[in-house]
Amino acid sequence: MARPEWTEEWSPKVSTAEGAVRHIKSGDHVFVGSSAATPQLLVNAMCSPMLDVADVEVTSIMTLGPAPYCEPLAVGRFRHNAMFIGANARLAVREGLADYTPIHLSDVPRLFRSRQQPVDVALVVVSEPRYGTVTLGTSVDVVRAAVDVAGTVIAEVNPRMPRTSGDAILKLEEIDWLVPHRFELQEIAPAVPHGVAEKIGGHIARLVEDGSTIQAGIGSIPDAAIAALKGKRDLGIHTEMMSDGVVDLIERGVVTNRLKALDAGVSVTSFVLGTRRVYDFVNDNPDVLFRSTEYTNDANVIARQPRMVAINGAIEVDLTGQVCSDSVGTRFHSGFGGQVDFMRGASQSSGGKPIIALPSTVKDEVVSRIVPRLSPGAGVVTNRADVHFVITEYGVADLHGKSVRERALALVQIAHPRFRPWLMKEAKALRLVYPDQLEPTAEGPLYPEQWEGWFAARDGTRVFLRPVRPTDEDLLKDFFYGLSSESIYMRYAGTRKTWPHEERLRIANVNYESEMTIVAVAIDENGHERLVGLGTYVVNPERNEAETAFIVADEYQGRGIGAALFRRLADVARTKGLRALVADVLPQNAAMFRVLQKAGLAVQVDDRTGRVAALLR
């Protein structure tokens, strides 16, 4: 095979892999490039028996392909120090043949630059030279800092490596040895969508507003979340990792980056990983800016993006909101990565939403990933104070600023139904919830998500109508004690000073079949809810009808919310085959009669008793 033309101009730096790695000495600290830019030829040459070295420390974040420095035969010659554990290092770490350093991805460059973690030799992959420069291609992440401080830089030069921008650009003077090596970059195909991931992606998408800036990783859930954003507008990208799904959004015009506060007009990432499609997309593409994790993962930078949405995964979450992401019990599995960087940055963003997303179960629904306590030895990556939204296929739990009681109730609600009775018993045993908290059954009831929806009044008021949840008891309490005495009198046909916990508990824990409660909530820019209306019914099976009542917060009355609640209750009741909704209405309650008229149903009124029946058929 003919040698590339650039080798003539830079011939003093050109070497074979075997010749270049001879510059590695016993006791050196060697950094190995990341992900699709793993320099496999140099790694194999370094680990060859022909290189006579001892006690070499090999440092990296996630690499792809074999890791011979982790093999038992490498003991004494090499010791791996993983700052993020990939599949090729997991067994070695588990068996004590390699080390794991827990660290935020934003901090790794600082370790290199301060020489707390020395880098004597950096092994990397670069694009072909052009105008005296090469680029780090698909992986800038922590590679840039390693190259900047390394005493010796050895680079595989691969014509299949895309030429990328920003912090990726290196002058050839910064590289000591150039090793020509044409090879196809390793690819990771997008995950095949499945029901659980698609449901989780749908829940995530409902939290994402137009104009948001997105961070997401790789895997079935991030892929499903990205796919679910295809109907959004003017999204931005500021992430540590970019994959094929983001390319879809850019090509569809969903991602424009025009509303970003920083780096407007460009998608920002520290590395890309996916198929050849994404590698080709970033090649010489000025609309994708590559930056070191010193920048992409800086929480202060992340926080400056309005409506920053950070999507991260977890191995398990306990009932108080502790998130384990790097270990399975005592066995280290991956690493901190950028989870905390982005969770904290998004939490400080105006309208930001930090999200932890995970399936409710693992191992064919045998093991719950919502747990009473983290597994023995499991580490906390995102702590209780940093957690905000936790999402499974069963819904969204908003935990930030909530008590451990509210957290436990919310997390039980999004656990797999099979595990909810066990989780509630454990929550009671741990004194996290009320002793009389109603316990769900494994058969349900499942939350009827289909009855959720927005209502817009003529004056522009927007409220979200949805079925009540067990987690709503405190919202119900605040709603009641905010009502005027007149509103209470009209609802209860008498005066009431209190609404006891036992009654609120019953209202919040309906079975969605023989009883239903629909609430109207106002949602602020941070996604937090305030209850502004309430409608209920209880079925009378003998008459095939339901007793109904509803009430609206005083400052929200006269906007059509009562009529919207009544219509929603009527829609639900109709699907259950009920004949009518009936209510006892005080004669002076003119507002109630107006609501019934606006609901658009045939209404019969008994003038003698004041009993009203809204016919559903």
Image (cartoon, helix red, strand yellow):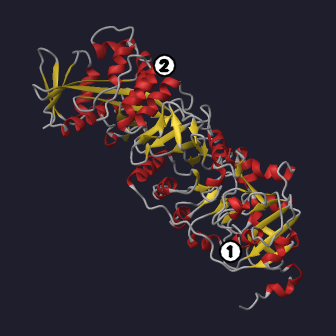
Res. 389 visible in picture: yes
Q: Is residue 166 above or below residue 573?
A: below
| Residue at image coords 13%, 27% | 541
For disc 1, the marked residue is 161
Whether the residues at callouts 2 and 1 have beta carbons within 8 Å, the answer is: no
Going by the numbered disc 1, the residue's amino acid type is: Met
Q: Nearer the viewer, residue 246 or 452?
A: 246
Residue 528, above or below 477: below
Point out residue 248 in the picture as x, y percentages from the top left corner.
51, 65
Q: Is residue 265 visible?
A: no
- Please tell me which residue lies in front, 448 or 589: 448
Q: Is residue 599 left or right of residue 318?
A: left
Q: Residue at x 82, y 63 (%)?
A: 147
Query: Could you say whether the residue bearing mark 2 is in a helix, strand or loop?
Result: loop
Horizontal placement of 604 versus 358: left or right? left
Quadrant occupied by the C terminus:
top left
Q: Nearer the viewer, residue 330 or 324?
A: 330
Which numbered disc, 2 or 1, marks the residue that appears first in the sequence? 1
**Quarter of the figure with residue 479:** top left
Foreground mark, 2 or 1, reads 2
* Numbered mark located on residue 461 in the image: none
Q: Which amino acid does the dot numbered 2 rest on? A: Arg
Image vertical order of residue 94 relative to residue 169, above or below: above
Q: State the residue at coordinates (69%, 66%).
A: 38
**On-image quarter of the N terminus:** bottom right
Cα–Cα gap, marks 2 and 1: 56 Å
Residue 384 location, x and y as percent? Answer: 59, 32
Q: Look at the numbered disc 1 and give the secondary structure of its residue.
A: loop
Q: Which residue is mark 2?
A: 431
x and y, in percent, of residue 239 in the image: 64, 54
Between residue 88 and residue 495, name the one nearer to us. Answer: 88
